[in-house]
């Protein structure tokens, strides 16, 4: 019973981090164009692509982790979700470092 | 009757045809069937007879693991840089988001280690080439591209 509760708590924590990533990405998606227009700039296709990429990546990572682990026991499933989270975080960090934000604007 | 017996599975047909004398035999047959059905389950759960890795596979695992370790170090340094840069921003607007963002930054360096452990756990008792394919995929996905920042 205790291990079940712990498992669900860990699951909730990992899911919360996924949700945070989506929320933050949606924040970027909605706020960055506003800021750009205030500066008299517009977003180009590259900018829109990377903004939507940020929203979609955590969702896709979460779904893949669930899909791969759908026939596994609880521990393996949690491990997969954690791995997915770490990979998504790494790719996001990668994008933020490799793609210069100045290339987003027209 | 004969046709019916042929159509149905042989074991059960014998058992049903020989209702009186065959019953003692039917019980062990059931046990055997249960055993056969029961065996694959622990295999899938990952606690089968232990199949030892060949020395070649061990060397391969060690090599790939070394590359993963290298990846971890590089990701760690990048996460450190990102979190320091982000901390400067967060100081002006202290919030839950800042804490979560820091968490996400520090989860990133765990990606190679988690991937490696996941592959080892999930491919336990399976063929070595499957494990190798998954590990190679991890090497591709987790390449720390910022390391080659000068090329972009």
Image (tube, rainbow, N blue to C red):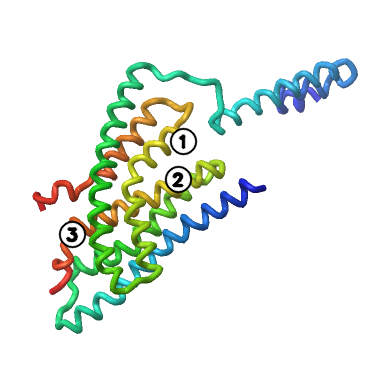
Q: CA distance from mark 1 to mark 2?
A: 9 Å
Q: Which one is in front, B17 or A33?
A: A33
Q: Which residue is mark 1?
A: B122
Across and down, in percent, residue A54 comes to 31, 62
Q: Is residue A17 above or below residue B110?
A: below
Q: Which residue is mark 2?
A: A80
Q: Counting other residues with Cα less than 10 Å from the Cα at mark 3, is it few (<14), some (14-19), or many (20 or more)?
A: some
Q: Counting other residues with Cα less than 10 Å from the Cα at mark 1, is it few (<14), some (14-19), or many (20 or more)?
A: many
Q: Earlier in the sequence, mark 2 or mark 3?
A: 2
- Asked whether the residues under the numbered discs 1 and 3 touch, taking CB atoms below 8 Å apart as contact, a structural biologist would say no
> On the rendered structure, is A35 left or right of B125?
left
Q: Which one is in front, A12 or B60?
A: A12
Across and down, in percent, residue A39 comes to 16, 82
Q: Which residue is mark 3?
A: A99
Q: Counting other residues with Cα less than 10 Å from the Cα at mark 2, is it few (<14), some (14-19), or many (20 or more)?
A: many
Snapshot quadrant of residue B57: top left
Across and down, in percent, residue B71 comes to 26, 41
Snapshot quadrant of residue B100: bottom left
Secondary structure category for the residue under label 2: helix
Q: What residue sits 34% from the left and 33% below the top?
A: B133
Across and down, in percent, residue B67 comes to 26, 34
Q: What residue sits 50% from the left and 41% below the top?
A: A76
Asked if badge 1 and badge 2 are on a common chain, one would say: no
Q: Chain of mark 3?
A: A
Q: Chain of mark 2?
A: A
Q: CA distance from mark 1 to mark 3?
A: 34 Å
């Amino acid at each position: 019973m205790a291990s079940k509760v712990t498992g669900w708590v860990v699951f909730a924590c990992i899911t919360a981090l996924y949700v945070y990533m989506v929320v933050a990405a949606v924040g970027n998606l909605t706020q960055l164009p506003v800021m750009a227009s205030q500066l008299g700039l517009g977003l180009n296709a590259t900018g829109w692509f990377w903004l939507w990429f940020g929203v979609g990546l955590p969702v896709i990572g979460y779904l893949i982790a669930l899909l791969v682990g759908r026939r596994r026991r609880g521990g393996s499933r949690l491990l997969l979700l954690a791995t997915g989270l770490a990979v998504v975080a790494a790719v996001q960090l990668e994008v933020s470092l490799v793609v210069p934000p100045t290339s987003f604007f027209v | 009757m004969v046709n019916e017996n042929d159509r149905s599975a042989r074991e059960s047909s014998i058992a049903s045809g020989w209702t009186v004398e065959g019953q003692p035999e039917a019980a062990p047959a059931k046990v055997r069937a249960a055993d056969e059905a029961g065996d694959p389950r622990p295999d899938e759960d990952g606690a089968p007879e232990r199949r030892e890795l060949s020395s070649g596979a061990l060397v391969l695992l060690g090599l790939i693991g070394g590359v993963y370790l290298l990846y971890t170090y590089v990701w760690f340094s990048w996460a450190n840089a990102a979190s320091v840069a982000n901390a400067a921003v967060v100081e002006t607007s202290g919030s839950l988001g800042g804490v979560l963002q820091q968490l996400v930054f520090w989860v990133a360096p765990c990606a190679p280690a988690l991937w490696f452990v996941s592959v080892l756990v999930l491919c336990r008792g399976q063929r070595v080439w499957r494990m190798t394919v998954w590990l190679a995929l991890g090497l591709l996905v987790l390449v720390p591209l910022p390391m080659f920042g000068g090329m972009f």
